Image (tube, rainbow, N blue to C red):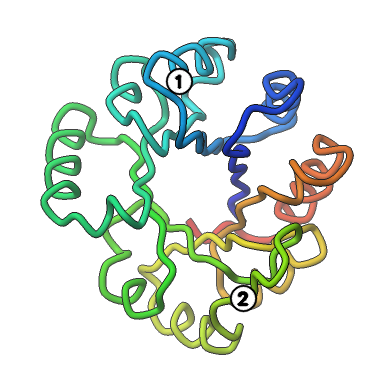
Amino acid sequence: MILTVVTKSTTIENEHELIAAMFRRGLKYLHVRKPNYSRESMIDYIEKFPKEYHNKIILHSHHSLALSLHLKGIHLTEKLRKNEFGVWKKFNLYRIIRPKMHISASFHKIKDLKDNSQRFDYVFFSSVFESITKENHKASYSLRTIFNVLNNDDEIKAIALGGVDDEKISICYETKFSGIALSGYLWELKNPVENFEKAKIICDQYKNKL
């Protein structure tokens, strides 16, 4: 299974050191989600990582930096994804400039997932479980409903997001997710690097669907 990490939206203490430790332990997909960062702040954030890790970084904003800084790719939030012209423009422009650039997107509704997810390298689907840190933030659909969709369409490469921890990885695999995204499990609990390692060991036990 694919293991992705989503940054916290705000800056945390020792963030670069913690993420660099995850890179050294095999992290291949870092989603940088910093919605309040200016372009300059984003450049500064990225350049604090050694260049050897830049090809593992996926941006949720300031997408043009993925080209100029030679990053792995971009991620489209649901708001941006629903702008059909914006999606068309980014797809055509970025695929022409860098045909193999990673492009992923966020989905929250089953219908949208079934109709529009196939063109992306993979998609985030949330919320799969009750939030680890947010009260009254419940799962959006039953696991059976999600399974029925993913099991019937091999072209959907969905990453489980929302309430995922090491104990839920096997459930995600059985529900036919292609991978998981870790966020609160790392940034809201103690020992984020150790938690990443535990999750990676479990993910490596399952055959990668991608």
Amino acid residing under circle 2: Ala
Provide residue 165's location: percent of width, then percent of height: 76, 58
Provide residue 191's location: percent of width, then percent of height: 88, 38
Q: Identify the residue shown where x is 41% and y is 55%.
A: 122
- Count neighbours of disc 1 (C-alpha within 10 A) and say few if under 14, some if 14 to 19, many if 20 or more: some
* Residue that label 1 marks: 42
Provide residue 167's location: percent of width, then percent of height: 82, 65
Give the side of residue 204 with respect to residue 191, left or right. Answer: left
Give the side of residue 87 with respect to residue 200, left or right. Answer: left
Residue sitting nearer the eye, 20 or 63:
63
Instruction: Answer with the quarter of the image where residue 179 lies.
Output: bottom right
User: Could you tell me which quadrant the N terminus lies in?
Assistant: bottom right
Q: Identify the residue shown where x is 76% and y is 23%.
A: 13
Q: Secondary structure at mark 2?
A: loop
**How far is mark 2 from mark 1, CA to CA?**
31 Å
Amino acid residing under circle 1: Met
Is the residue 152 above or below the residue 116 in the image?
Answer: below
Count of marks placed on residues: 2
Q: Identify the residue shown where x is 72% and y is 66%.
A: 135
The numbered dot on residue 139 is 2
